Image: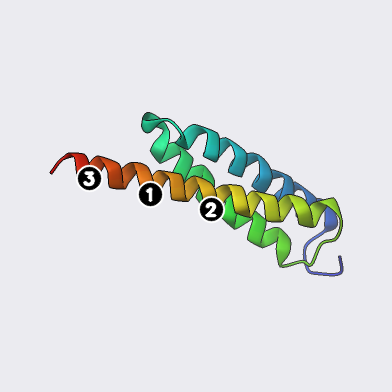
Amino acid sequence: MGGMLPAVIVRVSAFLSLALGACGFLVSLYPLGVLMGAGAGVFALLFGSAALTEHPDGWTRRAARGGIAAGSLALVVCAVWVALALASER
């Protein structure tokens, strides 16, 4: 890790990405948690991409990629809930 950010910040960013992505996905499974799940998914993507710009190795890279995947999945679930809500109003 020879980038501009210290290694501790990259590790914390990767961990936050994974934690926020998982929480965002679990919260977005409920209709009332769509907004919070989408917010957590966006922040998971931001933290994960910030961690990956420093080219980490080992568990840090896996955590960042897992956080990005979970955050993306949370956003997809939120989009499905919104589509279902709009379709049911018609």
**Mark 1: secondary structure:** helix
- Residue 79 is labelled as 1
Above-or-below relation of 58 to 82: below
Instruction: Classify the position of the N terminus by image quarter.
Output: bottom right
**Cα distance between the residues tagged 1 and 3:** 11 Å
The tag earlier along the polypeptide, 2 or 1, is: 2
Tell me the kind of residue under disc 3.
Leu
Q: From the image, tell me which residue sits under label 2.
A: 72
Cα–Cα span, label 2 and label 1: 11 Å
Q: What residue does disc 3 label?
A: 86
Using a 10 Å C-alpha cutoff, classify the residue at mark 2 as few (fewer than 14 neighbours), some (14 to 19) or many (20 or more): many
- Seen at 79% across and 67% down, the residue is 55
Which residue is found at the position 68% from the left and 50% from the top? Answer: 66
In the image, 82: left or right of 42?
left
* Neighbours of disc 1 within 10 Å: few (<14), some (14-19), many (20+): some
Outermost residue on the left side: it is 90
Residue occupying the point 67% across, 45% down: 18
Above or below 90: residue 45: below
Which of these two is toward me, 76 or 3? Answer: 76
Rendered residue at 45%/50% (across/down): 76
Question: In the displayed structure, would residue 72 be above or below residue 90?
Answer: below
- 7, 79: nearer the viewer: 79
Q: Amino acid at mark 1?
A: Ala
